[in-house]
Amino acid sequence: MTIGGIVKHLAWAEDRWFQGRLLGSDMPAPWERPGADDPDHSMRLAPGDTVDEILELYASACERSRAAVARCDSLSHLAAVSSFGIGPVNLRWILVHMIDETARRAGHLDLLRDALTSS
């Protein structure tokens, strides 16, 4: 668990839910490679990953998410791809899920910060 890995995972989650599920689009780079569209893989830093690249990856994913939301006519808009094997979720569910996902990762970042500052 690293700060960079957490931010990279959040970028993956944004693309997974808004591009892959809501719109039904192919995952954008760098998630389009075989095996890259995996929550565990998204937390791993690649050789050469830099702070600036990871921050840009997250900012770009958030920009794509906002554009995807703008394409929907209501919060009840159904996602193009089924989730959890039970059918499509709607935009409202995805937004709440992403708030939860981001808050959870912020908690992980708090724990890392506390561990680093108390050493």
Image (cartoon, rainbow, N blue to C red):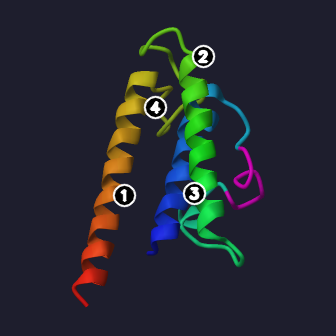
User: Mark 4: which amino acid?
Assistant: Ile
Badge 3 density bin: few <14, some 14–19, many ≥20, Cα 10 Å: some
Residue 98: x %, y % from top left: 41, 40
Label 4 or label 1, whichever comes before in sequence order? 4
At horizontal 71% and vertical 32% (from top left) the residue drawn is 25
Badge 4 density bin: few <14, some 14–19, many ≥20, Cα 10 Å: few
Q: Nearer the viewer, residue 112 or 20?
A: 112
Instruction: Identify the residue position indicated by label 2 in the image.
Output: 71
Q: Are marks 2 and 4 in contact (CB under 8 Å)?
A: no
Looking at the rendered image, the disc whose residue lies closer to the viewer, 3 or 1, is 3
Q: CA distance from mark 4 to mark 1?
A: 26 Å
What secondary structure characterizes most of the magenta part? loop
Label 2 or label 1, whichever comes before in sequence order? 2
Q: Does the magenta-highlighted stretch encompass residue 117?
A: no
Q: CA distance from mark 3 to mark 2?
A: 25 Å
Q: Nearer the viewer, residue 62 or 12?
A: 62
Q: CA distance from mark 2 to mark 4?
A: 24 Å
Instruction: Identify the residue position indicated by label 4 in the image.
Output: 86
